[in-house]
Amino acid sequence: MNPYGEFDDARREYVILRPDTPLPWLNYLGQDELIGLCTNTAGGFTFWRDARLRRLTRYRHNNVPLDLGGRYLYVNDGGTVWNPGWKPTKTPLDRYECRHGLGYTRITGARDGVEVEQLFFVPPGETAELWQTTVRNTGEGAKELKLYSYVEFCFYEALNDMTNYQRTYSIGEVEVDGAAIYHTTEFRERRSHYALFGCTRETAGFDTSRDAFVGVHNGLHEAAVPFAGASQGSIAHGWNPIGSHELHLSLEPGTAETFAFVLAYVDQGDEPKFERPGVVDKERGRRLLERLAEPGAVEDAFDELGTRWDGLLSRFQADCPEPSLQRMLNTWNQYQCMTTFNLSRSASLYETGIGRGMGFRDSNQDLLGFVHLVPERARRRILDLAATQLADGTCYHQYQPLTRKGNAEIGGGFYDDHLWLILSTCAYVKETGDTSILGEPVGYADRPGSRDDLLHHLETSIGYTLANRGARALPLIGHADWNDCLNLNCFSTEPDESFQTTGDVEGSAAESVMIAGLFLYASRELAALYGHLGRPADEERLLGAYDEMLAAVEEHAWDGDWYLRAFDAEGRAVGSNASEEGAIFVESQGWCVLGGAGARNGRARKALESVHERLYTEDGTLLHQPAFTRYRPELGEISSYPPGYKENASVFCHAHTWIDLAWCLLGDGDRALDYYLSICPATKEDRIETYRNEPYVYSQMIAGRDAAVPGEARNSWLTGTAAWSFVVAAQGILGVKPDYAGLRIDPCVPTGWGSFHVTRRYRGVVYEITVLNPDRVCGGVRSMTVDGLAVAGNRIPLSTGKGTVHVEVVLGAEQAAEAFG
């Protein structure tokens, strides 16, 4: 059992019952432009669109304690000061509860007959974060309470905010207007936006200076104003502006009062910035506060949030015999897919929001788990990504979401990046049937004004890989492939060099078997798209390129029991049975099998059996074995980590999913489910003190058997594991696969499953799909009826003009599963 919390499936919430969780357990507020990170003790920060360039509030990662700073409310009850979220005062509470839900967090704390409940959320379409606050007197006597809100403003550009103190200590500006505090730093010059922190209730005081509110020599746990019980009315002139309201409440026994704090981003656009010299035009901010202060406005906004998620999740729901798969697939996995789509790898408790923007490779993969939720947003993202590709086929590895411009600071030359665009585009067309996206003019980032369409980009991606191959006709690796830390061209011996930007790329002959497998998959996908478009010559051309790469893989990349990982700059095999360390790698086994290698000669199954024997553990599949025990300059960053952590032989959950899909491809449903459950966070609750991370979302890695603490998870939330786990469960195990001509039903289930049911909204039609397994087989469709009529094969004909279609599938045919895509 988990002593810290439990799932409430009926309410789609995770309920945390103790604030001292093994690590801070995070949730996200907002799915549109305003995003907030909110931990189970109300920590975190808020930003508009870009966590680096439009940060509203400050947060110091890797602080002591780890999660310090956020959206705080201090309660002064007769001189005793406490917080409903426990931090920062950590005053003992009589009761604590945090409910993380879909786009909201509800934290309740109680002490000495007073209960304070705070509901944090961002209404759909708003640029305001609401803190609906309810204070109840649950005791037997009257209560006279003083409350103090607290946020610390960030000066928008987060890196400058935390490093350029010779400037930032002098530029902070605020204005106070009734119950509203306006953070207007830099508004006088280049900015057209400000932050607003207001209250829908009458206030008794305020503070905007951190020095005045906290005390220069104090910490947040002993902030001067709440403990003194009196605001100072401070106005910040430089230094560190904050927002704090003082509220006085008189409550008789059994009574309560509800109000809201509002943290908002307001952009003046083309409107005048000042109503008179030195005074900001606050009309938009005033209207926002007035609207949210109207009776029922906050409740209506929260209802709208719930309605939105009801609609989103209704697009895919499953009823199956495995509770953990059902729980994750129906709610938490799809929720995490929305978050990774929104943020890529930019802002979490492990990513500061400063060093990384939207990853090209990352975002294309994130689309695979998101495209069914909001296809129109997926369409826009694909075009944005294509616009950061260069004319030679390479890509900006990342771009900033606010500017949509490529970020060259983190380097380039990752020779797998461009191929992922093919996977995301094909997934979008299969989901929507919208082939018009292929003709959208996008152009290339290094050719201003160019109008080349998306299909041209896909061809450029294929062409780049074909034109950049080594001595064995396998793709060159560049700075790295999917594994950023396998740097075969770096040879770094200087401690301050970047592994991802150092080294000779153009002159290197290092080749990647993983990219070869990915190319096999991508070229076959593009060929099928051309088949759908009625372009047989192009389809045949792509299949020819596929055959050519497949021949190179089978001739040069097979090591006897598994596929090699790569060939280094000197032409030596990486991931070979002859290797002292790093003898077998997981990525090349997964992608070679998914790409069709080994399908006709038995190598696919042999490779997966080698993975099962040498890499599989109760916590998932290790990235490689044996672990590297010393730094190897010819391999790069992968050997810089201690054994069992990150890329050095951890369970890198992202790559684990590809092996799971490969088992589905081979039709082994028992192993497919076992592998799925091995990394599933919902199965870790009985080991939560070791696992430590949130049990409701996937983590990037779980420490491997060579680690000091095997089974410990790190880097939760923003990981490609989310999208690929959805693909594993929805398309691999349950086998509901979008295709160009309709949904294809091709399950790969455990032999113990007798039946399952899926509700799938697809191209405007709801498909109610019941799958029966009377013979207890893993897969193979024996028969299928659609609205009572028998249909040959396993593809549901496209339906138009019908609200709901009922499908019944009976398993039992002797046939292998088809590819998951």
Image (cartoon, rainbow, N blue to C red):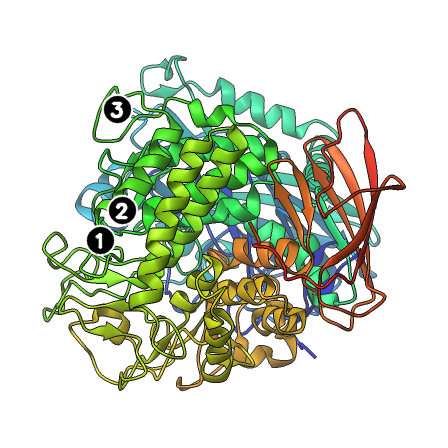
Precedes in sequence: disc 2 or disc 3: 3
Q: Spatial distance from mark 3 to mark 1, Cα to Cα?
A: 51 Å
> Can residue 468 be seen in this snapshot?
yes
Q: In which quarter of the image is residue 85?
A: bottom right
Q: Can you identify the residue that label 2 sits on?
A: 466
Residue nearer the viewer, 351 or 390: 390
Precedes in sequence: disc 3 or disc 1: 3
Image height of 650 relative to 409, above or below: below
Q: Can you identify the residue that label 1 sits on?
A: 469
Q: Identify the mark at residue 189; answer none if there is no mark.
A: 3
Image height of 232 relative to 645, above or below: above
Q: Which amino acid does label 1 sit on?
A: Arg
Q: Which residue is drawn at 27% across and 25% down?
A: 190
**Whether label 2 touches label 1, CB < 8 Å:** yes
Image height of 407 relative to 656, above or below: above
364 lies left or right of 509: right
Residue nearer the viewer, 734 or 814: 814
Q: Spatial distance from mark 2 to mark 3, Cα to Cα?
A: 50 Å
